[in-house]
Image (cartoon, grey):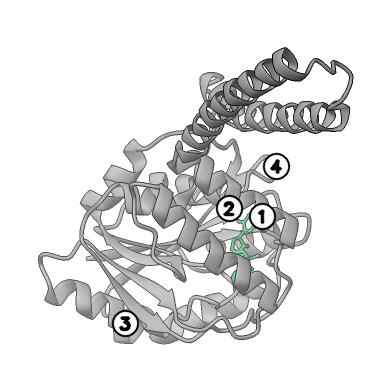
Amino acid sequence: MTISVIVPCFNEEEAIPLFYAAMEAIKAELAEDLEYIFINDGSKDQTLPVLRELSQKDPSVTYLSFSRNFGKEAALYAGLRHATGELVTVMDVDLQDPPELLVQMREILLANPDLDCVGTRRTTREGEPPIRSFFANLFYKLINRISQVEMVDGARDFRLMRRPMVDAILEVSEYNRFSKGIFAWVGFKTEYLEYKNVERVAGETSWNFWQLFNYSLEGIVNFSDAPLTLAFLGGVIACLLAFILMGIVIVRTLIFGDPTSGWPSMVSIILFLGGFQLLTIGILGKYIGKIFMETKHRPIYIIKEKSDSR
Ligand code: UDP
Ligand code: MG
């Protein structure tokens, strides 16, 4: 059996040799053939030359090089499409997905014919800024309430899958890819292996707080229409309140006259409604933006160069 190892790389010249060495070190224990598929996601450093050299040395190393940075999600998709193995794993190159776990994951998978996938879950978020962990927790609480698919808190993309699950993921060819959601959405039986957070071996994370915030918004918009429902419900409540207030104002004017008082309350109401409308339009806009990108039917990634070892 061959295990396809999919590794997205963005500016990872330092990490790639370390990753490769760590994988080769567990190869014997894995007792399977490995097929590496590195994806150079538009790196600006020496990632591509490093991959070229590696694939020349080792025929089991192949690479795809994108024409620009398309993002990790696109890289994962490209890797999955090119994987030929019966088993497929996706791993970060920074060794935050410990290769040693793969041995255990394979054993669990092969011991349970019912199981389609063994995933990994971080039980700690050590070495991460507390504010980041706080928002991450909040995100998982929220998404699991408002979305049909269940996303496991702390679950990484790092997983070992059987072929049928991979084929199912490939069927989900949407442009707006939120892998954590897609892995959950396709179903199949997944068991999670827990481990302690490991820090990046070299290089730097390419995520800042703002990007992570956007990423979680992606997750919500891609896997839930609850915000639309909320906007709708808010609109209904605002309407009802407006009718009641209107009634009160009319009755009060009929009984007491006094047409000019009540200016502050009017301004407050106008401001509130104005703000509320902008908010709901904003929510609508988020979804329309997604539809817009989706209807263009643009390719998810563009390959500029491939290793020719296959
Ligand atoms: N990555 C990528 N494209 C990007 C950003 C990241 O292919 O635009 C890769 C990166 O090289 C690494 C993995 O995705 O192998 C995870 O990235 P990173 O370690 O920066 O994320 P973190 O572990 O901090 O969530
Ligand atoms: Mg990392």
- Among the two numbered marks 2 and 4 on one chain, the one whose residue lies closer to the N terminus: 4
- Among the two numbered marks 2 and 3 on one chain, the one whose residue lies closer to the N terminus: 3
Mark 3 vs ligand 1: CB below 8 Å? no
- Among the two numbered marks 3 and 1 on one chain, the one whose residue lies closer to the N terminus: 3
Mark 4 vs ligand 1: CB below 8 Å? no
Disc ID at residue 68: 4
Q: Amino acid at mark 4?
A: Arg
Pair 2/3: label in front: 2
Where ligand 2 lies, by image quadrant?
bottom right
Which corner quadrant of the image does residue 285 belong to? top right
Which corner quadrant of the image does residue 255 belong to? top right
User: Does residue 28 show up?
Assistant: yes
Q: Position of residue 35 (x, y in %)?
A: 39, 63
Disc ID at residue 103: 3
Instruction: Give the left or right position of residue 134, taking residue 31 as reference.
Output: right
Marks counted in the figure total 4
Disc ID at residue 216: 2
Whether pointer 2 and pointer 4 mark residues with C-beta atoms closer than 8 Å, the reply is no
Q: Position of residue 82 (x, y in %)?
A: 41, 47
Q: Amino acid at mark 1?
A: Phe
Q: CA distance from mark 4 to mark 1?
A: 23 Å
According to the picture, the residue beneath numbered tag 1 turns out to be 213
Whether pointer 1 and pointer 2 mark residues with C-beta atoms closer than 8 Å, the reply is yes
What SS does tag 2 mark? helix
Look at the picture and state if 155 lies above or below 234. Answer: below
